[in-house]
Image (tube, rainbow, N blue to C red):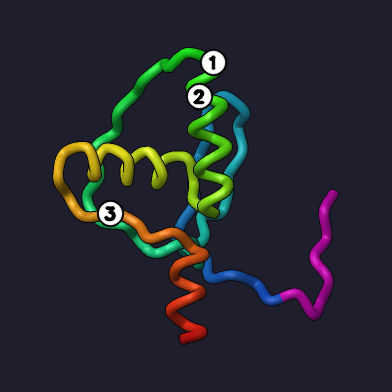
């Protein structure tokens, strides 16, 4: 059985979730932290050839972006939109300047 240390802060319990399959109650805790919302987004799924996917991943990592953010920027540029997300490296350069 798990026992919390006495100095461990206890989260506020919002309610209980009953799982009938396992017959136990779980405490639900308020959401904490996480990244800020990027706004409304639409999911798109593609299955590029392996070589293309590897090139996309490499360039996203080079720009210090998630694959999703990099692909969104490529699509934005192809359709005349401004970049969706700036590279984290360019954001750091702006902070330094």
**Which residue sits furthest top?**
49
Horizontal and vertical percent position of residue 87: 44, 59
Instruction: Decide: is 54 above or below 49.
Output: below
* Residue 3 among magenta residues: yes
Q: Badge 1, how many Cα within 10 Å: few under 14, some, many 20+?
A: few
**What is the magenta segment's predominant secondary structure?**
loop
At horizontal 53% and vertical 70% (from top left) the residue drawn is: 12
**Which residue sits furthest bottom?**
97
Residue position for label 3 = 83
Q: Residue 38: name its quadrant.
A: bottom left
Horizontal and vertical percent position of residue 84: 28, 53
Marks 2 and 1: CB-CB under 8 Å?
Answer: yes
Residue position for label 2 = 53
Q: CA distance from mark 3 to mark 2?
A: 20 Å
* Residue 88 among magenta residues: no
Q: Earlier in the sequence, mark 3 or mark 2?
A: 2
| Residue 48 as seen in the image, left or right of residue 58 | left
At horizontal 43% and vertical 78% (from top left) the residue drawn is: 94
Instruction: Decide: is 47 above or below 40.
Output: above
Circle 3 — which element?
A: loop
Q: Which residues are magenta?
A: 1-8
Q: Earlier in the sequence, mark 1 or mark 3?
A: 1
Residue position for label 1 = 50
Q: CA distance from mark 2 to mark 1?
A: 5 Å
Circle 2 — which element?
A: helix
Horizontal and vertical percent position of residue 43: 29, 33
């Amino acid at each position: 059985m798990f026992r919390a240390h006495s100095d461990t802060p206890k989260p506020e319990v919002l309610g209980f979730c009953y799982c009938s399959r396992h017959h136990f109650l779980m405490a639900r805790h308020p959401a904490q932290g996480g990244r800020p919302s990027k706004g409304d987004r639409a999911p798109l799924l593609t299955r590029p050839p392996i070589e293309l996917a590897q090139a996309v991943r490499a360039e996203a990592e080079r720009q210090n972006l998630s694959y999703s953010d990099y692909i969104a920027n490529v699509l934005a540029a192809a359709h005349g939109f401004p970049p969706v997300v700036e590279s984290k490296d360019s954001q750091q350069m702006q902070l330094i300047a």
